[in-house]
Amino acid sequence: MELDFSLSPMEVKGLRSQFGDNVVHESLDFHVNGQEIVGLVGGSGSGKSVLMNTLLGLKEPDGGSVYYFGKDRDSLSSKDRQGLNNQMGVLFQGGALFSSMTVRENIMVPLREHTDLPISLMRELADMKIHMVGLPAHAATLHPADLSGGMRKRAGLARALALDPKLLFLDEPTAGLDPIGASAFDQLILDLREAMDLTVLMITHDLDSLYAICDRVAVLVDKHIAIADSLPKVMNHPHPWIKEYFGGPRSRAALKAGAS
């Protein structure tokens, strides 16, 4: 299968997700444009993680369709699905690194699983990704327990980028970081987007990140995406939850900081 990278990297039409009688998503439409950074926000229990798991193929939708680069995922063979999966990298909350492996070994996991490259080349590629995410060279031989929270995030990001994906999914990437570390991580995402032509979808509650790096913000409320647009347009949406979320004192402080 040849993916057409000139088409929309991801589009969701009429998505339905449910667990038993509990409907999480209903008639959900959503798309991400090439090389943009989209922030996904929503209240607790709104289904953000379920949506990300569905987009990653970890959960099958109960209705509707998911398209990647113009291809309906349901129509793909298992081999083509695997090729598509190799174009998607994901940074789970907390990094989700294997504790028994070094940073280099963690980054090599996707390379071992999906390529036939020589081990020596895998090591070189892993070390290159370590450098790309701003970790020091000696971090390659450290274990996750030896890393700070920010370093673990960067190591998890390096593993997500191991196969040079076109799509990057981030789950609360700045959660737990101090303001300086969070700002540096935001800048790293911007730099990597430019260097690797990445398209990024990130779940976040970090208002500073929304203001600093997102081209569009998608709001998940009432089982669907109420709006996915530029931040000024999202902030003017009349939905009560959106007005409360973006009209509160923390949001105003983040907006003021972003404008300064």
Image (spheres, helix red, strand yellow):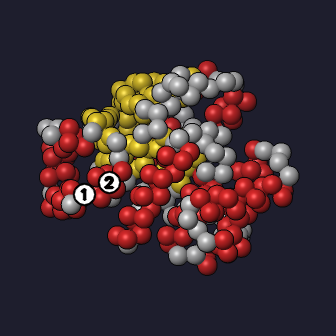
Q: Residues within 10 Å of mark 2 (few under 14, many from 20)?
A: some
Check the image and name the residue furthest to the bottom: 146
Mark 1 neighbour density, 10 Å: few (under 14) some (14–19) many (20 or more): some
Between 51 and 178, which is closer to the camera in this rendering? 178
Mark 1 sits on what residue? 258
For marks 2 and 1 on the same chain, the one whose residue lies earlier in the sequence: 2
Left or right: residue 205 versus residue 82 is: left
Q: Quadrant of residue 51?
A: top left
Residue 212's label in the rendered image is: 2
- At x 84%, y 58%, the residue is 120
Which residue is depicted at the point 21% across and 60% down?
Answer: 260
Q: Are marks 2 and 1 in contact (CB under 8 Å)?
A: yes
User: Residue 153 appears at what percent x and percent y?
Assistant: 52, 64
Tell which of 51 and 193 is nearer to you: 193
Q: Secondary structure at mark 1?
A: helix
- Residue 40 visible in image: no
- Picture layout, residue 207 above or below residue 32: below
| Side of 70 where 75 appears, left or right | right
Amino acid, disc 1 = Gly
Q: Is residue 186 visible?
A: yes
Query: Can you say which quadrant of the picture contains the N terminus?
Result: top right
Location of residue 36 by image quarter: top left
Q: Nearer the viewer, residue 36 or 78?
A: 36
